[in-house]
Amino acid sequence: MKKRMLLGASASLALSSIVRAQAGWPTRPVTIVVPFAPGSSSDIIGRAMAQQMQVSTGRPFAVENRPGATGEIGARQVIRSAPDGYTLMHAPISTWAINVALRPNLGYDPVTQLTRITQTVRTPNVLVVNPQQVPATDLAGLVGWLKRNGATASYPSSGVGSSDHLTAEMFKIATGTEMAHIPYSGGGPAMTSVVAGNTQVSFQNLGSVLPLIQDGRLRAIMTTAAERNPVLPNVPTAAEAGLRDFVVYSWQGFGGPPGMPAPLLAQVHEAAIGALRAPAVASRLTELGFDIVANTPEEFATFQQAEIARWKRVVEAGNIKPE
């Protein structure tokens, strides 16, 4: 009984220290863990937010890259951290949702072991083809070409379980077509393979393919957005092209360790939203092809659950296995 009382007292003291600290958050440097390499979209967005949050709070914010295991290494570091607002995380769809669907032995649970703060951004994928190898200019033409040439056609991805990989698998299921999957170590090498003609078709984030479309090295067939994008006004959405119920976004989320007290969560959320909506940050993210979401923790949690369920269906239907 005495031992239980001591443990309870220790927990109460720890919680009290966090509650006292949150009143003036932040009073010391904050670390934003990015579970992917420098230069990744998660890193670029995380650094933009960190810089703006440092300006707005007057306290240092630093990004720490902890790549590996499609985000698991960084996520586990955050999970082990104190829920005091000084260790946070910015990570993509794979860390927040796809890993759950793809890896049955995943070493963390992003639903129960991470605090959802806000979904930061989203961007549609664009279906592109190599114009020298694929004559199709619209969806019907591409589907016809794949049904004739699917046995020898292939598509690249930035890795097994990535958004571009699973979007392509959704496309195959929806259209009854076939293509071989060629995984690469990132979006850059994947795009290089399509431009070079080593692969023929790909789904990639808008920002990464826009320059290649504009200079004619890739041809855009459709986007996976709900509405046409202003930077590609002549490219139809999937629904407009004839593929219903095919709205897909690659997205990013901001979170922290489990058990963050509600008042602290509100403070961190306010700082994150303020950073995303700051004119310099918003302008930069828009230029890169991102839509700013900046929703509430509750909205982020509901969206995350829907995404996990969606990608589980795709993984099961395509019999997709982790590397």
Image (cartoon, rainbow, N blue to C red):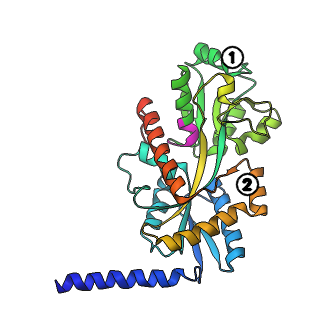
Question: Which image quadrant is residue 223 in?
Answer: top right
Q: Which residue is mark 2?
A: 285
Asked if the residues shown at circle 2 and circle 1 are in contact, with their CB atoms under 8 angstroms apart, the answer is no
Say which of 226 and 63 sits in front.
226
The spot of residue 161 in percent (x, y) is: 50, 42
User: Principal SS element in the magenta part?
Assistant: helix
* Residue in view at x 50 percent, y 41 percent: 160
Position of the C terminus, as image quadrant, is top left
* Residue in view at x 54 percent, y 68 percent: 88
Position of the N terminus, as image quadrant, is bottom left
Above or below, comparing residue 2 to residue 100 in the picture: below
In this rendering, position of residue 86 left or right of residue 139: left
Q: Which residue is mark 1?
A: 141
The spot of residue 213 in percent (x, y) is: 78, 35
The spot of residue 195 in percent (x, y) is: 72, 34
Above or below, comparing residue 189 to residue 138 in the picture: below
Please provide the residue range marked out in magenta.
Answer: 161-166
Residue 200 makes an appearance in the image: no
- Packing grade of label 2 (10 A; few <14, some 14-19, many >=20) is some
